[in-house]
Amino acid sequence: MAKPIVLDQEWLERIATQVNGLEYGSVLITVHDGRVVQIDRTERKRFETNAAKQSQPQAQNGNDKLKAVNG
């Protein structure tokens, strides 16, 4: 039978810290023998196509390091 998970205030604060400010992503909580032993946070950044196009400066004189390739 599984042991009940014991969370003290310190672990609750750690989890809340990882979740706060997370816009897109996930928080993985690893439990061993009914105890939280690890917290993994994976954060994703999403960029809107229109916003990205508007925020990119126009290429000048072909000296840009990154260039779009028409496929």
Image (cartoon, rainbow, N blue to C red):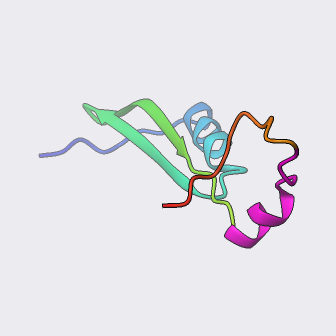
Q: Which residues are magenta?
A: 49-60
Residue 7, image x, y percentages: 48, 39
Residue 12, image x, y percentages: 58, 41
Q: Is residue 65 magenta?
A: no
Q: Please tell me which residue is depicted at 82% across the width and 54% down the height of the picture.
A: 56
- Relative height, residue 15 to residue 47 (above, below): above
Q: Is residue 55 magenta?
A: yes
**Quadrant in which residue 24 is drawn:** bottom right
Counting labels gives: 0
Residue at the outermost front position: 61
**Quadrant in which residue 51 is drawn:** bottom right
Is 43 on the left or on the right of 21, as rendered?
left
Is 68 on the left or on the right of 32, as rendered?
right
Residue at the outermost bottom position: 50
Q: Please tell me which residue is depicted at 64% across the width and 46% down the height of the picture.
A: 16
Residue 11, image x, y percentages: 55, 34
Residue 45, image x, y percentages: 63, 52
Is 20 on the left or on the right of 37, as rendered?
right
Q: Please tell me which residue is depicted at 77% across the width and 64% down the height of the picture.
A: 53
Residue at the outermost top position: 37
- Relative height, residue 54 to residue 32 (above, below): below
The residue lying toward the viewer, choosing from 15 and 7, is 15
Q: Please tell me which residue is depicted at 35% across the width and 36% down the height of the picture.
A: 30
